[in-house]
Image (tube, rainbow, N blue to C red):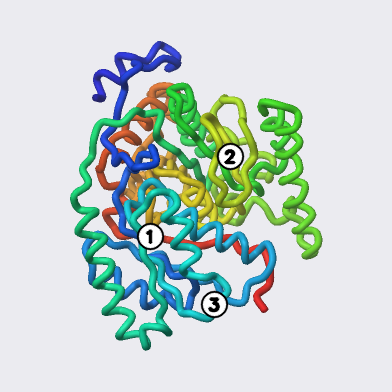
Amino acid sequence: MKTDLIANLTANGAVFGANETFWGYQRENGQVGARNHLAIIPASVCAAVTAARIAAIVKGAVAIPNQHGCCQVGADFQQTKRTLIGLGQNPNVGAALVIGLGCENIDAAEVAAAIAGAGKPTDYLVIQACGGTLSATAEGARRAALLARDLSACRRTPCPVSSLVLGVECGASDFTSGLASNPAVGFASDLLVQAGGVSMLSETTEFIGAEHILANRAVSPAVGQKLLAIVRNCEQRSLAERVDLRGSQPTPGNIAGGLTSIEEKSLGCVHKAGAAPIQDVLSYAEAPAGKGLFVMDTPGQDVDSVTGMTAGGATIILFTTGLGTPTGSPLAPVLKISGNADTCVKMKDNIDIDVSAIIRGESSIVESGQEIFWEMLRAASGRFTKAESLGHCEFGIYKTGPTF
C-alpha cells in the first residue's frame, strides 16, 4: 500500500490513485471506523465509576470518563448531551451501552436511542432501577458482553481513503511547530481532502491574529463571517471575565519554546489546515455535512478540543507538539508529530513521527507530509499509536456555563 501511495503522488502531492484504500470497519450507515470499540457511556458523572467497572470486565469495552451531565442547564446542557451522542455515533464505535443513574438531567434512554438511530447496536441501563452499584455492574457486564461478542465478529475490509475523518490538533507548541510539524500535517490534511475525505481544524483561541487569513479561504462570504464571529465571541467571553487573551497567550511553555506573541502562535497553528478551502464552521461536537476542510469552534485546551472533534466524527487525530505531550483519546487513535529533535529523543515513548529533518534542511514539508499521511493510513488500518499502546485516554467535554 505504501509503494502504491507514494507512486501515485505527483511532485506536489496533488494526485492519488483512484482506488487507494486502508483497512477499516464498514458500518451499516456507510461510515468507516478505524477502531471497533464497544463504548460504555455514562450519562452523568454519577454513573462514571459503574461504567468504568463494566468496561474493566468486558474485553473490547472502553468507558468514557464523563464528568458532567448533572445539574447543567441551557446551552451547556445541550452541548454535553450532543457530545455524548456524538461519541456513541463515532464510526470507531461498533456498539454502545449507556449507563444512567436515573435522576440526572441527561436521560440514558434518550442518548441510547439517538446512538441506535445511527445504526449502532445499543443498550442502556439505569443504576437506580437495577438496585445499586453491584447489581448495575453485574447487569451491565452481561449486556456489554453480549454486545462485545457480536462486535467481535466484525472484520476489517479495504475501504476508500475518502471515508476517513481527520482531526488536526496542536499542543505544547514551540518554534518548530509553525515551521515544521504544522505545515507537514497541513500537507497531509490537503492530501486527504484532495482524496475526498474530511479534515477538521479546531482551537478557536489559536486563530486570534490569523483569523482573517482563514476567513479568506472560506467557500463563501457567509462562512468567512461565521469564522470571524467565533473568534470575536471567544475574545468577548474572555473580556467579560476580565481576561485579555492577547495578554495571556502564548503560555509560559510556548514562550520558553520560542513563541513571542499570540499572532505568531496563531500563524503557526493555522498551518495545520493546509491550503484547502474551508467548507463550513461547526459548533463544538457537530458533525460536518459533506466533504472537505471544516473548522470546529473548540477551546484551546487540547483534551476538550480532541473530544469535540471525536464527537463530531473524527476517526483519527494528527497532533503536533514541540515541547511534547502524551495526550490520547478513548475512541480515536492519536498520532504525535514533532519537529523538535530534542523532544523526539527525550519523549520518544510518546512521539510517533519525527519531522525535525525539515528544520535541519534534510527533508521538505511535502516529503514529511507524505510520510505523515502514510503513517496515518497505517494507524487507521489498526496499528497502535504510542498513546494507545501506553493507555492514554484523556477526555474532557468543553463546559460553557455554570452548574446549578
Q: Nearer the viewer, mark 3 or mark 1?
A: 3
Q: Mark 3: few, some, or many residues within 10 Å (few <14, many ≥20)?
A: some
Q: Nearer the viewer, mark 2 or mark 3?
A: 3
User: What is the x, y in percent for residue 148?
Assistant: 24, 60
Say how many tags the image has. 3
Residue 317 vertical position relative to residue 243 in the rendered view, above or below = above
Q: Quadrant of the N terminus?
A: top left
**Label 3 is placed on what type of residue?**
Glu
**Label 1 is placed on what type of residue?**
Cys
Looking at the image, residue 377 sits to the left or right of residue 192; the answer is left
Query: Could you give the CA–CA distance between mark 2 and mark 3, rounded to whole angstroms?
Result: 38 Å
Query: Could you give the CA–CA distance between mark 1 and mark 2, rounded to whole angstroms?
Result: 24 Å
Residue 346 seen in this snapshot: no
Residue 395 seen in this snapshot: yes
The residue indicated by pointer 2 is 269
The residue indicated by pointer 1 is 393
**Label 2 is placed on what type of residue?**
Cys
Q: Secondary structure at mark 1?
A: loop
Query: Could you give the CA–CA distance between mark 3 and mark 1, rounded to whole angstroms?
Result: 25 Å
User: What is the x, y in percent for residue 25?
Assistant: 29, 41
Looking at the image, which is closer to me, 392 or 290? 290
Please tell me which of labels 2 and 3 falls first in the chain.
3
Cβ atoms at labels 3 and 1 below 8 Å apart: no
Residue 367 vertical position relative to residue 317 in the rendered view, above or below = above
Q: Which mark is residue 100?
A: none
Looking at the image, which is closer to me, 88 or 237? 88
Looking at the image, which is closer to me, 353 or 380? 380
